[in-house]
């Protein structure tokens, strides 16, 4: 009966993750669709306010608002700030490259998690994970080759920086997961998004720094202007998709073990390929596929290595 319950929770976690990735892909596609017309901080603040309202509603309906409390608000905000930076870097890359390429480059996040754990937490990386990191970085290099759709430009760095800041967020989540609920972490993420976007809007919202001939920087520095009703409808859908996606993502890791759920995050890649093709006619070239495969294989090796290590630790525990 215990084994059946474990399998059931694993299946529930995987289903929650899959649904979360579908909703988040919809949110990403809307942001990319609107990126030539509106600044990043404007799109982020509108979708985040909508998402925050819905997350609070979810919390009230499923467990009460008390679950949103935390004893470490500043650490929560710092974690949220790292994710807000990751989100900003990712969307800057998404504005100027195919969705599949951006998501593939972002998938080097597990490699950075290993490196950060080694540098800041003193964790042992080991030969297998070092080799996996090397393979993943080789995948990034392959995608960055000039013959790809994107070409060798500095824009390649945006999803990589997104992965790096996301990795810092993951390390911080390890500290918070023992004491804070998924709901409280979701709320502080969105509060951080809103705070950073509002500050950005106040500093650069007039467009006075938009003097660069680069699509990514134009997306960042473009002047705020009020959207029409049809755009508000899209942003409402975007906010709802973000809220549901974040909530289901948090639930997936709460219900099932991370080692079971994490490998399925790579479903994002075929979802991104499908969305990119349907909306913009984007298809990755051969080098993109090769580089993506190298990054995914390296990430899966690290994840399954972590799973094996955790099982050994559990077996070695007395009792």
Image (cartoon, rainbow, N blue to C red):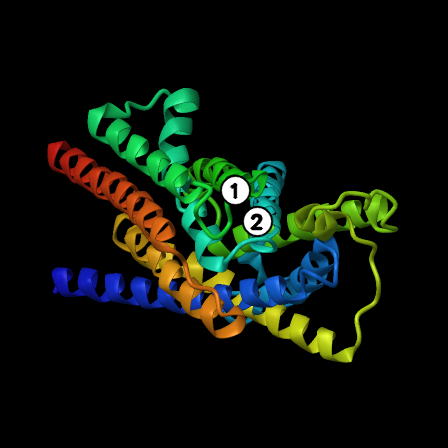
Tell me if 101 is positioned left or right of 305 in this view: right
State the residue at coordinates (88%, 51%): 206
Tell me if 293 is positioned left or right of 153 in this view: left
From the viewer's side, name the closer residue of 233 and 283.
283
Q: Quadrant of the C terminus?
A: top left
**Whole-Å distance between the Cαs marked 2 and 1?**
7 Å
Residue designated by label 1: 156
Residue designated by label 2: 93
As drawn, 17 above or below 145: below
From the viewer's side, name the closer residue of 182 and 124.
124
Lower sequence index among marks 2 and 1? 2
- Which x, y percent locates residue 261? 30, 55
From the viewer's side, name the closer residue of 70 and 41.
41
The answer to whether residue 71 is seen in the rendering is no
Whether residues under marks 2 and 1 lie with C-beta atoms below 8 angstroms apart, the answer is yes
Tell me if 63 is positioned left or right of 216 in this view: left
């Amino acid at each position: 009966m215990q084994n059946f319950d474990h399998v059931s929770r694993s299946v529930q976690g995987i289903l929650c993750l899959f649904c979360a990735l579908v909703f988040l892909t919809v949110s990403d596609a809307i942001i990319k669709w609107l990126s030539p017309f509106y600044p990043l901080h404007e799109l982020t603040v509108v979708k985040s306010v909508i998402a925050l309202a819905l997350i609070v509603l979810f919390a009230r309906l499923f467990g009460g608002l008390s679950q949103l409390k935390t004893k470490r608000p500043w650490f929560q905000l710092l974690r949220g700030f790292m994710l807000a930076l990751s989100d900003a870097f990712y969307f800057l890359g998404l504005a100027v490259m195919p969705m599949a390429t951006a998501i593939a480059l972002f998938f080097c996040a597990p490699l950075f998690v290993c490196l950060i754990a080694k540098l800041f937490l003193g964790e042992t990386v080991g030969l297998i994970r070092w080799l996996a990191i090397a393979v993943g970085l080789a995948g990034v290099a392959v995608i960055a080759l000039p013959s790809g759709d994107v070409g060798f430009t500095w824009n390649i760095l945006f999803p990589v920086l997104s992965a790096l800041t996301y990795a810092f967020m993951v390390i911080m989540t390890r500290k918070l997961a023992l004491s804070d609920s998924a709901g409280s972490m979701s709320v502080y993420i969105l509060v951080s998004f809103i705070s950073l976007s509002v500050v950005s809007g106040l500093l650069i919202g007039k467009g006075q720094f938009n003097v660069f001939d680069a699509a990514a920087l134009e997306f960042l520095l473009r002047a705020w202007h009020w959207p029409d009703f049809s755009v508000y409808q899209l942003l409402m859908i975007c906010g709802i998709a973000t809220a549901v996606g974040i909530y289901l993502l948090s639930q997936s890791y709460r219900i099932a073990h991370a080692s079971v759920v994490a490998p399925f995050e790579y479903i994002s890649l075929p979802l991104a390929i499908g969305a990119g093709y349907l909306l913009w006619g984007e298809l990755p070239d051969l080098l993109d596929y090769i580089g993506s495969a190298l990054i995914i294989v390296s990430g899966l090796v690290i994840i399954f290595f972590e799973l094996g290590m955790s099982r050994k630790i559990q077996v070695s525990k007395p009792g």
